Image (cartoon, helix red, strand yellow):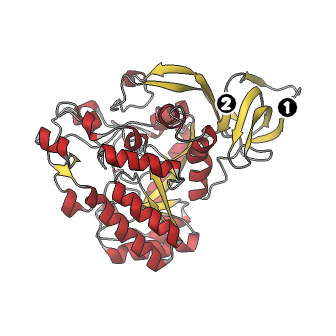
């Protein structure tokens, strides 16, 4: 199987390439990148006027399988992924059963092979059932090929368990992907604590619920000389701790979701839980801090925390509604529109934050368009704009606060291992 992509603007952060080029792909690899390639190919794609970039790597995705197939499946979640230009996802372990044994890892890997459109990497649970009290069989999880450990959705309160997890991960140079939330401070909260929560009479979650645990986890990581990846940063104080730790040389990386650098808690309405997410949408001051941190290069990657939920779990009143935003199909367009079009960062930097950097964090040799490299590629029309409408999502989760937003950047083709798996 061969594919020739003609006349696209190839952008590759790993090498700094940013030029109109042809790209020849054979089987699963990029064979040649040149100004003009005249070889015959099974398929020729005209990418004139479009960008050709490494497929995105989303380190924070809830595929919900096994156990919550009414919300999403590996098939629907990865179809949504490739529609968003995402070619590798790391799936979070808060499934049922949780990803706390080699059997569950294997099940996901096998299902992904059968029905996955994108590549699926697996994040193992730090503790059994993500309950925080009994450590998972981490050695067997590592042997079965997980790319990191997390109790995402919760913080692991027990420091001795955290230290053991750090120790195991150190042997493989893989990250502990920390959901940072002090439950004693966050308990019962459903939105950011501030003026808006007061006005709405809803219980707030303070910034300190996040930043206290960010600080704790940085200390633990430092002590264990291991690797920490902070999930979905949202609070200004967390960012301060992370910047400080990076300066000190602690091996910490950090991800951010589009909703945390675009939206503030001003949009929260008690009768619409599509804005309910954990960590919550924060204040203007926090969002400004996030933008500053992105501009300064302190934030390593953009992820989605793609958290699909069925309608009824969002329609039970704000306090009771499920936390989460379905985000994998809108991530690039939102990030491009709000970060690049608003001149906060360059297009090259955005592509780096969505492909090369996250691939490096989980030590996968993707996120790089180069001769001899795997052909995981997205082709995107930056001149095309559209209005977000979650009824058109491939994901089962229609829960997004971005409905009606005008964005730029339409994914027209996605290739995984050299095969076109999505075309608009
Ligand atoms: O909003 C969220 N939803 N945050 C999390 O940490 C978990 C996620 C989910 O699983 O729905």
Q: Quadrant of the N terminus?
A: top right
> In the displayed image of the protein, which residue is found farthest to the right?
38
Kind of element beneath mark 2: strand
Provide residue 175's location: percent of width, then percent of height: 50, 64
Front one among 372 and 13: 13
Residue carrying label 1: 35
Give 372 or 192, whichever is nearer the viewer. Answer: 192
Query: Residue 120, relative to residue 219: is it above or below?
Result: above
81 to the left or right of 258: right
- Name the residue beneath numbered marker 2: 51
Q: List x then y, in percent, for residue 170.
A: 53, 73
Q: Is residue 389 above or below residue 395?
A: above
Label 1 Cα neighbours within 10 Å, binned few <14 / some 14-19 / many ≥20? few
Q: Which residue is situated farthest in the left direction here?
A: 201
SS at circle 1: loop
> Horizontal and vertical percent for residue 271?
17, 30
| The C terminus lies in quadrant | top right
Residue name at image x 51 percent, y 56 percent: 298
Q: Is residue 196 left or right of residue 213?
A: left
Instruction: Tell me if residue 10 can be seen.
Output: yes
The span from disc 1 to disc 2 (Cα, nearest Å) is 15 Å
Q: Is mark 1 within 8 Å of ligand 1?
A: no
């Amino acid at each position: 199987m061969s594919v020739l992509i003609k006349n696209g603007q190839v952008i590759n952060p790993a090498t700094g390439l940013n030029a109109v080029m042809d790209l020849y792909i054979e089987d699963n690899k990029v064979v040649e990148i040149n100004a003009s390639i005249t070889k015959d190919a099974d398929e020729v794609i005209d990418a004139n006027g479009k960008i050709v970039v490494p497929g995105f790597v989303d380190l924070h995705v809830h595929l919900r399988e096994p156990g919550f197939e009414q919300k999403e499946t590996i098939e629907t979640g990865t179809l949504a992924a490739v529609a968003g230009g995402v070619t590798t996802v790391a799936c979070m372990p808060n499934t049922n059963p949780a990803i706390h044994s080699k059997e569950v890892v294997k099940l996901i890997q096998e299902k992904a092979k059968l029905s996955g459109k994108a590549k699926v990497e697996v994040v193992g649970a730090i503790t059994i059932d993500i309950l925080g009290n009994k450590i998972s069989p981490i050695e067997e999880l590592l042997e079965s090929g997980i790319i990191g450990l997390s109790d995402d959705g919760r913080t692991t309160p027990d420091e001795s368990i955290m230290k053991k997890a750090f120790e195991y991960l150190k042997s493989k140079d893989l990250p502990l992907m920390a959901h940072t939330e002090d439950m004693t401070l966050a308990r019962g909260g459903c939105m950011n604590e501030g003026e808006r929560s007061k006005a709405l009479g809803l219980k707030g979650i303070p910034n300190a619920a996040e930043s206290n645990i960010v600080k704790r986890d940085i200390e633990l990581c430092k002590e264990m000389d291991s690797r920490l990846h902070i999930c979905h940063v949202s609070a200004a104080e967390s960012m301060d701790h992370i910047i400080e730790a990076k300066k000190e040389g602690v091996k910490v990386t950090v991800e951010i979701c589009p909703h945390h650098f675009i939206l503030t808690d001003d949009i929260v309405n008690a009768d619409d839980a599509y804005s309910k997410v954990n960590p919550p949408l924060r204040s203007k001051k926090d969002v400004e801090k996030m933008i500053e941190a992105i501009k300064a290069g302190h934030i390593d990657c953009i992820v989605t925390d793609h958290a699909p939920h069925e309608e009824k779990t969002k329609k039970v009143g704000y306090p009771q509604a499920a936390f989460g935003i379905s985000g994998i199909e809108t991530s690039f367009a939102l990030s491009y529109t709000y970060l690049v079009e608003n001149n906060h960062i360059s297009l090259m930097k955005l592509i780096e934050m969505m492909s090369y950097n996250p691939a490096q964090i989980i030590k996968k040799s993707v996120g790089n368009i180069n001769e001899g490299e795997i052909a995981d590629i997205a082709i995107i029309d930056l001149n095309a704009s559209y209005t977000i409408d979650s009824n058109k999502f491939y994901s089962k989760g229609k829960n997004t606060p971005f409905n009606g937003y005008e964005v730029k950047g339409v994914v027209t083709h996605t290739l995984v291992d050299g095969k076109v798996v999505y075309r608009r």
